[in-house]
Image: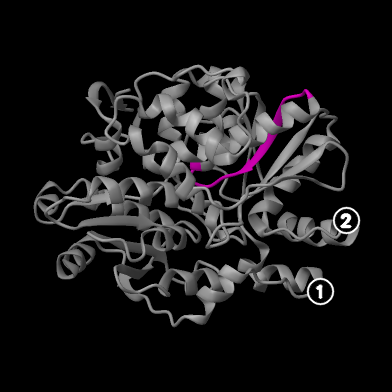
């Protein structure tokens, strides 16, 4: 299968080349030239996440240099669970995606991308520098996935003072081939700096660059797998489609579910839950798409005012009315996040992170207006990563997963930089 830019359908490149580049030469995002169609029968006899992922992704890897390694890549990357569990309220479920090494859903895509990149760079003459902008969880997942891998270095940019303390510690605790920078600005500033570097042809001549943000196909495609796994498992057990409420910031996680459904997977409706950064809810309510500066919220990993993957969404649904007819999006402010965390614990002994609380809050809203059928709120991070928010609301300590305990024991450091491309460029050349 070939891949093209969202901005120029005439471009064509291989999956390996698209993963290696991160961003298309014209600044667009890579998308498949066509979406394969898969029915449930294609997954008969497959029960594990790695096996379902291999079958799902096989058409995307067809004729590519990485094709033969796909089963091994899936087995390496998806060696931790993604359980679909019932919530206390009838017909409500939660998909827990936080059982990986950094306790966030980003571990799935980051580990898959690292497995691909390691194979692609095995014989490269120059080290590859992976640039990643993070609003909290992406950077740690990418750092953990690439830490110690040969011929690759990672540069993490995150907004200073706008991530949770435990997130910040994770971002700076790896060292070696991982370089972390606190940017004096917002996540949108970090994302802008990454895109400037990726589009800097002169810099690329001296320093091969790629991206590990959700603009990367190497992260987006594997994230389809856990939606396929959950939807297929649910349909086998209940003979019904599963509908999803997905907390989203840069729209990568939701885009993965949307692509999986477009490929024929038994996924029902998809509803987007954002925090107070309501660019997407405003669009789906009928307003023009108007990116704006992000604002800081309790659900900081979703503090995005210009979601990059909206460009992919518009590629899949070029007509705005059709796009609005297929989805809805709801904004959840900090007060509602606090209320949801507190009341779900009081009523049902559930403990959710602020991002998951956005999805739970929207699901409650859907039920209040009379929505029926089976719904799933996607849980994107372990609540222990947000102890300073969650613990005062529930009145007890949240147990810390063993993998997170290990990371928090390490010393951490990140260099402060202004949101200035010239200084970042100088740093990149200095690292090289």
Report the quarter where the N terminus lies: top left
Residue at which label 2 appears? 348
Within 10 Å of the Cα at label 2, are there few (<14), some (14-19), or many (20+) other Cα atoms? few
Nearer to us in this view, 73 or 274: 73
Q: Quadrant of residue 64?
A: top left
Within 10 Å of the Cα at label 1, are there few (<14), some (14-19), or many (20+) other Cα atoms? few
Report the quarter where the C terminus lies: bottom left
Magenta-drawn segment: 239-252
Q: Is residue 215 visible?
A: no
Q: Which is closer to the viewer, label 2 or label 1? A: 2
Q: Is residue 320 magenta?
A: no
- Using the numbered discs, state the Cα–Cα distance from disc 2 to disc 1 in whole angstroms: 14 Å
* Residue 381, horizontal then vertical, whole percent: 61, 57
Residue at which label 1 appears? 395
Q: Residue at the location (51% across, 40% down)? A: 223
* Residue 262, horizontal then vertical, whole percent: 53, 22
* Residue 16, horizontal then vertical, whole percent: 27, 36
Mark 2 or mark 1, earlier in chain: 2
Q: Is residue 207 visible?
A: yes
Q: Residue at the location (45% across, 23% down)? A: 316
Q: Secondary structure at mark 1?
A: loop
Give the farthest residue toward the front.
Answer: 45
Q: Secondary structure at mark 2?
A: helix
Q: Residue at the location (24% across, 24% down)? A: 12
Q: Residue at the location (58% across, 61% down)? A: 103
């Amino acid at each position: 299968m070939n891949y093209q830019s969202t901005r120029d359908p005439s471009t064509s490149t291989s999956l390996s080349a698209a993963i290696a580049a991160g961003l298309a030469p014209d600044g667009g995002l890579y998308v498949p030239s066509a979406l394969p169609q898969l029915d449930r029968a294609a997954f008969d006899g497959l029960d594990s996440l790695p096996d379902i992922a291999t079958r799902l992704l096989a058409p995307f890897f067809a004729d590519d240099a990485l094709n033969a390694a796909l089963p091994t890549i899936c087995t390496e990357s998806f060696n931790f669970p993604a359980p679909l569990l019932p919530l206390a309220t009838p017909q409500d479920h939660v998909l827990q995606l936080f059982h990986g090494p950094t306790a966030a859903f980003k571990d799935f895509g980051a580990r898959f991308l690292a497995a691909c990149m390691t194979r692609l760079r095995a014989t490269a003459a120059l080290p590859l520098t992976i640039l990643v902008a993070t609003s909290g969880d992406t950077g740690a997942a990418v750092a953990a996935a690439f830490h110690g891998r040969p011929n690759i270095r990672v540069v993490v940019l995150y907004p200073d003072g706008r991530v949770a303390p435990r997130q910040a510690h994770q971002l700076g605790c790896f060292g070696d081939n991982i370089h972390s920078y606190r940017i004096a600005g917002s996540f949108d500033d970090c994302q802008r700096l990454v895109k400037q570097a990726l589009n800097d042809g002169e810099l690329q001549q001296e320093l091969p660059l790629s991206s590990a943000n959700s603009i990367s196909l190497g992260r987006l495609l594997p994230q389809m797998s856990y939606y396929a796994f959950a939807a297929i498992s649910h349909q086998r057990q209940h003979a019904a489609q599963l509908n999803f409420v997905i907390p989203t910031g840069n729209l990568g996680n939701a885009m993965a579910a949307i692509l999986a459904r477009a490929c024929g997977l038994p996924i029902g409706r998809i509803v987007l839950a954002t925090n107070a950064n309501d660019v997407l809810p405003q669009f789906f309510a009928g307003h023009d798409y108007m990116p704006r500066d992000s604002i800081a919220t309790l659900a900081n990993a979703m503090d995005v005012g210009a979601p990059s993957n909206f460009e992919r969404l518009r590629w899949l649904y070029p007509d705005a009315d059709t796009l609005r007819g297929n989805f809805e999006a709801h904004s959840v402010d900090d007060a509602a996040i606090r209320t949801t965390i507190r009341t779900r614990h009081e009523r049902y002994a559930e403990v959710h992170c602020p991002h998951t609380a956005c999805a739970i809050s929207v699901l409650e809203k859907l039920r209040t207006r009379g929505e029926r059928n089976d719904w799933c709120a996607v849980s994107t991070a372990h609540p222990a990563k947000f102890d300073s928010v969650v613990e005062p609301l529930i009145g007890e300590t949240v147990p810390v997963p063993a993998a997170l305990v290990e990371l928090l024991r390490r010393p951490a450091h990140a260099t402060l930089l202004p949101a200035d491309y010239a200084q970042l460029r100088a740093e990149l050349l200095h690292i090289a």
